[in-house]
Image: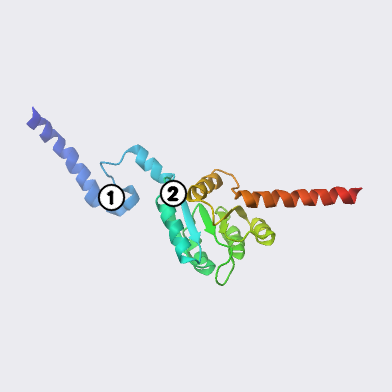
């Protein structure tokens, strides 16, 4: 009986092998059948949050690459050391999220955010910088940044911020959020005083 079942299963195995060796290469690597893949694994691949990094500090950039590559649910799309290099590729291979440093060689991160939002408006931009000056914060937000965190954020805070951004939030380091609120409160107070 076992031999009979083996014989019956041969055509099925043969068809899978034909699919793997002949048909699958024409369809591309994402369509290849793998007997060990489950439906859930394929679904998980479809919902990975892709991230590109634009950071000129090599050590910090490599640290972010390592963090994203090892975080569940994330995939590093690409990493760039300048705004110019990023704009060449980001239009062709847009990520879900771009992590942008403010101070870059050549074009600034603030200018890059404006360019990204003009050409590929669906990309969510999050600033990750040492700079916490009001001018940088508000120019970045005005140009289209949806989040602003400081580089001294812990790795788990960076990942949580990326998830929050992808889910529709506007992540900010506590210090940055306090500055934004304080600025709006000061403007509101000035408006009330001029009305009197």
Q: Are marks 1 and 2 in contact (CB under 8 Å)?
A: no
Mark number for residue 180? none
Number of disc labels: 2
Q: Which mark is residue 74?
A: 2
Q: Quadrant of residue 102?
A: bottom right
Residue designated by label 1: 24
Looking at the rendered image, the disc whose residue lies closer to the viewer, 1 or 2, is 2
Q: Where residue 9 appears, x then y in whole percent?
A: 15, 35
Residue that appears at 86% across and 47% down: 192
Where is residue 119 drawn, in percent x and y? Answer: 57, 60
Where residue 134 appears, as percent x and y from the top left, is 69, 59
In the structure shown, which secondary structural element does the residue marked by tag 1 occupy?
A: helix
**Residue 158, x across and y down, in percent:** 51, 50
- Residue at 24% x, 46% y is 19
For the residues labelled 1 and 2, the Cα–Cα distance comes to 26 Å
In front of the other: 66 or 54: 66
Residue in the image at 18% along x and 40% along y: 13
């Amino acid at each position: 009986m076992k031999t009979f079942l083996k014989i019956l299963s041969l055509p099925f195995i043969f068809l899978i092998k034909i699919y793997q060796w002949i048909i699958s290469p024409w369809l591309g690597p994402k369509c290849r059948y793998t007997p060990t893949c489950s439906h859930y694994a394929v679904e998980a691949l479809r919902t990975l949050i892709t991230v590109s990094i634009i950071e000129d500090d090599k050590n910090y950039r490599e640290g972010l690459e390592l963090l994203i590559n090892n975080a569940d649910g994330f995939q590093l799309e690409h990493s760039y050391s300048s705004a110019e290099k990023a704009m060449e590729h980001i239009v062709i291979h847009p990520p879900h999220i771009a992590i942008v440093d403010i101070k870059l060689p050549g074009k600034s991160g603030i200018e890059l955010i404006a360019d990204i939002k003009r050409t590929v408006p669906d990309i969510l931009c999050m600033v990750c910088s040492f700079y916490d000056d009001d001018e940088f914060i508000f120019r970045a937000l005005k140009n289209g940044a949806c989040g602003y965190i400081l580089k001294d954020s812990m790795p788990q805070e960076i990942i949580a911020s990326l998830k929050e951004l992808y889910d529709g939030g506007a992540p900010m380091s506590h210090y940055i959020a306090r500055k934004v609120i304080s600025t709006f409160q000061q403007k509101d107070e000035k408006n009330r005083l001029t009305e009197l």
